[in-house]
Every structure is written in C-alpha cells, then in structure tokens.
Image (cartoon, helix red, strand yellow):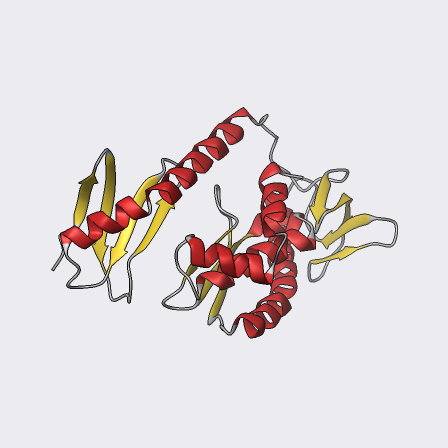
Amino acid sequence: MPRTGPLSVDDLTVEVTVRRVKRMNVRVHPPDGSVRLSVPPRTSDRAVVRFVRESRAWIDHHRRRIADEERRAAARPTVAPPEGRSGEVWRHFGHPYDLSREIAPGRPAVRIGPDGHLVVRAPHAEGDPAVLAVLDRWRRSELRDAAGPLLDGWGARLGVRHRFLGIRRMSTRWGSCVPSRGRIWLNLALVERAPALLEYVVVHELVHLREASHGPHFRALMDEHLPDWERRRRELDAGS
C-alpha cells in the first residue's frame, strides 16, 4: 500500500491519495497550484516518485498557467455586481443585450425581444433581488439547453457518455468532471460566451472521461477531434 498524504519529490510537494483507479492521475489545482495525485492500491512509492518526475514538465506548465490566471484576475478592474435594473447590459452567448423590466403579476418570465432587449417580466420592483433570481434560473436553463445537444453529439463521437450535468458558479474554472462517475459541471458564466467556446469546454470535459489527466494522450485526443482547441482556450481565458 503506498503512503497517503503529502509526499516530497525533489522540490515539489504532492498530495497522494489511494483510490480505485486503473492508473495514476495527477491534477494541478487553483488557486495555489497544489498538486494532487490519485494512485491505485498496491502502487509502490518508487513508482509514484518516478511518475511525478516523468510528469514534472506538464505539472510545471500548468502551475505557471494557474499563476498567470491568478495574476490576470487580480489585475482586472472591479465590476459592480448586477442589480437587475433596466439598462444594464447582460451578455447571452456572446451577444450583449440591454435589460428591460416589465413589472406585471403572474409567473416570472424572461425573453429576448426583437428590439435587442433582454426582457424580464415579473411582479418585482426595480432592483429587487428576486429579479436576479429569475434571471439566474433562466440563464441556467439556457445553458443546459445549449450544452445538452453538444454533450450528446460529442459524446457519441468520442465514444463516451456523461451521466450527469450540473451548472454552478466557478471562480477559476470553466468546467470540471468526475471521470469515474461520468459527472460534468459547467460554469454558469459560459452562458455569456460565444457558442464555440462552450463547445470547447464541453469537448474538454468529455475527453476527460477517456483521459483523466492533461497529459499527451489528452492533448492528442483534443488535437484529433477539435484541432483549434488551443485557440478557443486562449480566447476563453482572455475574456473575449
């Protein structure tokens, strides 16, 4: 049985966890670039050290990337949170829309009007937090509706099938997955981005159902199925 807990390999600290996996999987986690390694039972410490050293270039690359993302996030100007008031600009799959409010009784609803406005119809006054809740539910539904066909279509191409799709707010990641359970999570903020960028994240997470790490096999699968994935990733990270 390999040791569990922190393991020092050269100048790198790795958190080792024994799991029921077929092979060793390494991940680098924001915001501090911590390294976590899942290993099968009966893996020797010597094999763990060898694997970490062989993966060191990949680990260092992703630690630098995370550090760069954290620096960019810290340098971004602070944007006032939305209040659900008329005139605010809300982005929907890459397109900006001016928010319009219709205060009316009945079931709340959201629609995109022909005049280029995002219209919220609800019995709540301007600035009421309930308006933001209405928009949040609508955006989650819109993202789920857009992601569903992508997950099904790309899953068929890749020979995998997800078992669960969740949507939540994430501060440093666009998506995540649990390969052993087929669970995929998407960042709600993707509802603001262009469809091609949502497609990149979907393919990225589905490829993880075949390859849990970001190593050479993962990159080869991405190159094969979505040749411009690195350009889309840069565009997504750049915030354009």
- Visible residue check, residue 100: yes
The quadrant of the image that shows the C terminus is top right
Which of the two residues, 204 or 55, is positioned nearer the viewer here? Answer: 55
Q: Residue furthest right?
A: 115
The residue depicted at 36 percent of the width and 38 percent of the height is 33
Q: Quadrant of the N terminus?
A: bottom left
Q: Is residue 166 visible?
A: no
Instruction: Locate residue 132, reporting x and y percent.
Output: 62, 47
The x and y percentages for residue 169 are 51, 48
Residue at left 25%, top 36%? 12
**Left or right of residue 120: residue 136:** left
Residue 67 found in image quarter: top left
Q: Name the side, left or right, on which 193 lies relative to 46.
A: right
Camera-nearest residue between 207 and 179: 207
Q: Nearer the viewer, residue 230 or 152?
A: 230
Count how many numbered circles sit on residues in the image. 0
Where 225 sits versus 133, above or below?
Answer: below
Q: In the figure, residue 34 lies in which quadrant?
A: top left
In-image side of 136 versus 44 (left or right): right
- Residue drawn at x 69%, y 44% as measured from the top left: 125
Q: Position of residue 137 (x, y in %)?
A: 60, 57
Residue 88 drawn at (x, y percent): 73, 38
Q: Is 56 on the left or on the right of 94, as rendered?
A: left
